[in-house]
Amino acid sequence: MPPGPMAATPGTLQKLPTVESTGGEVLYLQSFDNVLLRCARWSALHSPGSGSALYLQGRTEFIEKNLESINELRRRGFNVWALDWRGQGLSGRLLADPHKGHVLDYSDYLQDLQLLVRHYLTDRAVGPIILLAHSMGAHIGLRFMHEHPEVFDRAVLCAPMLGIRTGIVSLCARLMAVAATTLGAAQGYVPGTGQYDIRSISFEGNALTSDPDQFSRTHAYIAADSRLALGGPTFGWLAASFRSIAQLRRDAKDIRNPILIVNAGEERVVDNVAGHRLLQRGLPHAQLMTIADARHDILCERDGIREIFWRAFDDFTGRGVLG
């Protein structure tokens, strides 16, 4: 793709897979505070499934973006569930400006996840239950494992949000977020961010993937359905994220689930150094690997990088492609 603003062609839009076209079913749950949560489930490609997997995505993401990874799980014999977090994807948005990525406390995410687990995994899951999660989803997954250690047999976490690269000194970012929320500006965009605008989206220099086709596909989905668009985070989300990271640092030593953490060597979104410190102090059953050439969105990287990831996944889970 040439550098410059994104433009999705009609041909690209017509070829986009959907939950239904990949054999999945869309489901909805009503949260504790009446936010409509969009979920989806798929059966393993080799029925009956011999295991279950939950995919948890990062901030700004939506289920369709991750259909390729979900299919990889199905090829390995997993029945799969996925969730659009509150405030993004096709779950209910929380503010009048639907582009604002907002939450006031991560307990809301944790309650939404518990609702999904209770309704769909507790009684319907078969075999071992694996968590595959990315970025913010991996962070929430770790918090959930601390509170509910019995749910997941193993977890594979891609570029987990164990610290945030804010572009300014971390302490200053925390103080700014706390001050803004205290002064009633929790719903304001973090400076330097704003609404999603496809005209300003460029592959060149992006921090997420080195694969132009993966990059184009993500934004083609948004061009096809503008409801999927999400812009920058609010001060409320940022303050809540810093509080949750601090809580995870206190809790990590008590998480006993076997965990594989896969970091991106070319990371520019989350703080790998903070993650390394957390591993030194906690997560006693965690393994760490880094894929040198990967950017933040490891599962939407080019083929060679994703092949490295899936080999590590198979080694860790004792799985492989069936059939």
Image: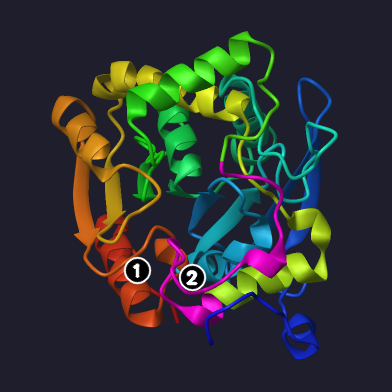
Quarter of the image for residue 234 reads top right
- Residue segment shown in magenta: 192-214
Say left or right for 248 vs 90.
Answer: left
Q: Are marks 1 and 2 in contact (CB under 8 Å)?
A: yes
Label of residue 72 in the image: 2
Say left or right for 76 vs 230.
Answer: left
Q: Nearer the viewer, residue 280 or 52?
A: 280
From the top left corner, tell me how far across and down residue 134 is, in percent: 45, 50
From the top left corner, tell me how far across and down residue 279 is, in percent: 20, 34
Q: Is residue 179 magenta-colored?
A: no
Say left or right for 90 vs 196.
Answer: right
Q: Is residue 84 above or below residue 211?
A: above
Q: Nearer the viewer, residue 257 or 50?
A: 257
Q: What residue appears at the point 64 percent right and 65 percent down from the top-left corner?
A: 200
| Residue at the bottom extreme of this rendering | 11
Label 1 CA crowd tier, 10 Å (few <14, some 14–19, many 20+): some
- The amino acid pointed to by label 2 is Glu
Quadrant of the frame with the C terminus? bottom left
| Residue at the top extreme of this rendering | 182
Secondary structure of the residue carrying numbered label 2: helix
Residue placed under numbered mark 1 in the picture = 310
Q: Nearer the viewer, residue 278 or 319?
A: 278
- The amino acid pointed to by label 1 is Trp
Tell me which secondary structure the magenta stretch mostly adopts: loop
Residue 218 appearing in the image: yes
Q: Is residue 114 above or below residue 203?
A: above
Q: What residue appears at the point 67 percent right and 19 percent down from the top-left corner?
A: 185
The Cα atoms of the two marked residues, 1 and 2, are separated by 8 Å
From the top left corner, tell me how far across and down residue 310 is, in percent: 34, 68
